[in-house]
Image (cartoon, grey):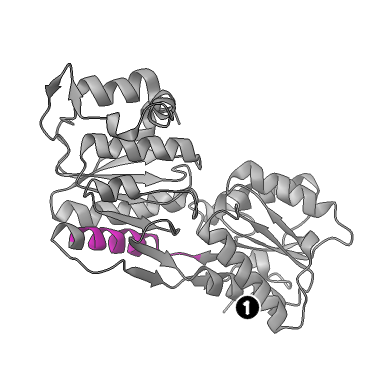
């Protein structure tokens, strides 16, 4: 995805984006977000110097009916699903969505946060790149309502929508145990994120509940991307004895893990049982179909939008957190006796 594609207008109210051409167009199509990031995070240039004026002339507030959605990886189908939920709820009140791809990069995320302040968007929905390092203070100082999705931002008390990651990971791991797998590995995400830590917690909880002590060599952490899953699975396949099954913390890493298994001529589930977080749009074409821990994408997006609408309506409640449940969908990739009744 190019810098120019990293931010787009979506949803209803799809008229021309009236944002200042000398500012946003230059950032998105000319210098790109990377160049803006370098400027906006330069310690010699204070954030307060990033002002909304061109040529010394004040410009009208262009994005009063626009929300910025700053997501950590728009390549991930999870965020496409969340976006659909956000758009559906936002459209009812006449808001459009400005989509920003931080690409799991803190500098890019910071640049988009600065850009949201600069453009005076009505509100921001963000999936923080880092639980501890993402700083939403500039939005709060500017009076911009903000809601987090998928992950927490510990530096600021804001509304958020999460799923019960630990319970989801626990259910997926317990399912593998119930199928007779005992040496179960984890391919986790970056531990700077809420999701990665909570999913590890659920995985380890399930093992201990069944008298299995977690082993450090069976937990490999990557970047929530396809190549990360490939590298992690390749590493696990070199361990001796090999794991019998694996819990993968998102769908993109699961794709990479499956590629590594195919290259190693490991059959799923005969040689390696597999459960992955998040539904696959292409799961019907996968052989075998993958057992998934499904997150309610649409509900996450709608809940985030509802929280943001509440703030825009003047709610003064302290930071609220909505926690949604996951659902385990059992398919052939995790069933030892393939062809058995999947219930």
Q: Position of residue 64 (x, y in %)?
A: 14, 42
Residue nearer the viewer, 257 or 118: 118
Q: State whether residue 128 appears in this view.
A: yes
Main SS, magenta residues = helix
Residue nearer the viewer, 337 or 304: 304
Task: Specify few, some or many for label 1: CA neighbours under 10 Å numbering under 14, 14-19, or 20 or more.
Answer: few
Which residue: 30% across, 60% down?
304
In this rendering, position of residue 162 left or right of residue 174: left
Asked whether 159 falls inside the magenta stretch, the response is: no
Q: Secondary structure at mark 1?
A: loop
In this rendering, position of residue 157 left or right of residue 231: left
Residue found at the very far right of the displayed protein: 240
Q: In which quadrant of the rendered image does the C terminus lie?
A: bottom right
Q: Position of residue 69 (x, y in %)?
A: 32, 46
Q: Position of residue 160 (x, y in %)?
A: 35, 62
In this rendering, position of residue 77 left or right of residue 124: right
Using the image, determine if residue 182 lies above or below residue 143.
Answer: below
Using the image, determine if residue 301 lies above or below residue 134.
Answer: below
Q: Which residues are magenta?
A: 294-309
The residue to which callout 1 is attached is 341
Which residue: 58% across, 59% down?
196
Q: Position of residue 194 (x, y in %)?
A: 51, 60
Q: State whether residue 261 appears in this view.
A: no
Which residue: 18% across, 31% down?
17
Using the image, determine if residue 95 lies above or below residue 103.
Answer: below
Which residue: 23% across, 45% down?
142
Asked whether 307 falls inside the magenta stretch, the response is: yes
Q: In which quadrant of the rendered image does the N terminus lie?
A: top left
Could you tell me how many numbered marks the image carries? 1
């Amino acid at each position: 995805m190019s810098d120019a594609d990293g931010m787009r207008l979506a949803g209803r109210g799809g008229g021309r984006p009236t944002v200042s051409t000398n500012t946003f167009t230059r950032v998105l199509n000319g210098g790109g977000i990377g160049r803006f990031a370098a400027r906006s995070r330069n310690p010699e240039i204070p954030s307060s110097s990033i002002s909304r004026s061109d040529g010394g002339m004040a410009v009208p507030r262009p994005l009063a009916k626009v929300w910025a959605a700053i997501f950590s990886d728009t390549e991930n189908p999870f965020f496409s699903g969340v976006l659909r939920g956000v758009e559906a709820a936002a459209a009812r009140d006449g808001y459009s969505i400005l989509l920003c791809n931080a690409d799991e990069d803190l500098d890019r995320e910071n640049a988009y946060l600065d850009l949201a302040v600069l453009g005076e968007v009505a509100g921001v929905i963000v999936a923080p790149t880092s639980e501890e390092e993402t700083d939403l203070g500039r939005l709060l100082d500017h009076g911009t309502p903000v809601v987090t999705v998928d992950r927490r931002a510990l530096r600021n008390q804001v509304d958020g929508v999460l799923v019960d990651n630990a319970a989801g990971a626990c259910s997926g791991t317990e399912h593998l145990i119930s199928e007779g797998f005992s040496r179960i590995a984890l391919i986790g995400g970056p531990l700077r994120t809420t999701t990665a830590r909570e999913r590890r917690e659920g995985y380890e909880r399930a093992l201990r509940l069944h008298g299995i002590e977690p082993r450090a060599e069976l937990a490999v952490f990557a970047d929530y991307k396809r190549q990360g899953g490939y590298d992690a699975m390749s590493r696990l396949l070199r361990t001796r004895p090999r794991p019998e099954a694996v819990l993968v913390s998102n769908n993109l890493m699961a794709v990479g893990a499956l590629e590594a298994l195919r290259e190693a001529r490991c059959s799923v589930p005969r040689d390696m049982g597999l459960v992955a977080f998040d539904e696959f749009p292409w799961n019907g074409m996968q052989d075998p179909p993958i057992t998934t821990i499904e997150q309610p994408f649409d509900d996450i997006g709608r809940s985030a939008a509802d929280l943001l609408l509440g703030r825009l309506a003047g709610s003064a409640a302290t930071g609220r957190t909505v926690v949604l449940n996951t659902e385990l969908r059992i398919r052939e990739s995790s069933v030892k006796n393939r062809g058995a009744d999947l219930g």
